[in-house]
Image (cartoon, rainbow, N blue to C red):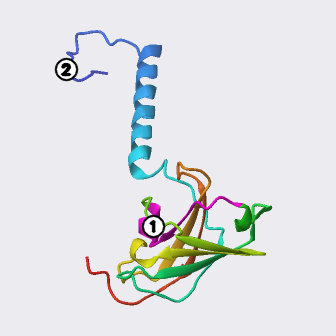
Amino acid sequence: MVRPNESETEPIRPIDRRDVLRGTAGAVAAGLGVAAFSGGAAAHFPSELDVDVVGAINPDTPARVPVRIRRTEIDGEEFDPTERDLRYRFGSPDGVADGGGATPVDHVEQPNAVWLFFRADETGFDGDDSTGELRWDKDETREHGYSGTDSVHIVGRRSR
């Protein structure tokens, strides 16, 4: 076997442990780099929340958008929104996935649900959306939590 840039008269050095380690380390580093830039290490928000978006949304106004989140069971445990921190974001699925979306400006607790109210002009809807997404962040890192979706009716068009 002849390696590139070697003549047939030079002896071929056998592959040793260092060669294997260098190759493995390079492959691992490349894999981590691809995961970091391709979303492989992305946030984790399973769609488990029971969400209702009520009324039409005009993203050109600061009107409030009411969103109800109900108590539900997730992986055998109860998710009671009345007992959770108010770390919610609501808006277009793409905007919320990118860390955006509106945060609640007000809320009302009921026995099995919480009504959250969001400013329509902070939701990121562009008029072509048909689904709204609510995310609950387990902590301030916004890397893990739960989400829920509901159909939305957009009126008007975003003028930006």
Q: Position of residue 9 (x, y in %)?
A: 22, 10
Whether residue 16 can be seen here: no
Does 86 lie within the magenta span?
yes
Please state which of the two labelled residues, at mark 2 or mark 1, is closer to the viewer.
Answer: 1
Q: Position of residue 34 (x, y in %)?
A: 40, 44
Whether residue 11 can be seen here: yes
Instruction: Say if 98 sits above or below 12 in the image.
Output: below
SS class, disc 1: loop
State the CA–CA distance, disc 2 to disc 1.
56 Å
Point out the image quarter for the C terminus. Answer: bottom left
Instruction: Say if 35 sits above or below 12 in the image.
Output: below
Instruction: Give the extent of the magenta segment.
Output: 84-97
Query: Which residue: 54% across, 69% down?
Result: 104
Crowding at mark 2 (Cα within 10 Å: few <14, some 14-19, many 20+): few
Q: Nearer the viewer, residue 84 or 48?
A: 84
Q: Looking at the rendered structure, which numbered label has been put on residue 101?
A: 1
Query: Which residue: 31% across, 81% down?
Result: 158
Does 45 lie within the magenta span?
no
In the picture of the structure, the residue carrying the numbered disc 2 is 5
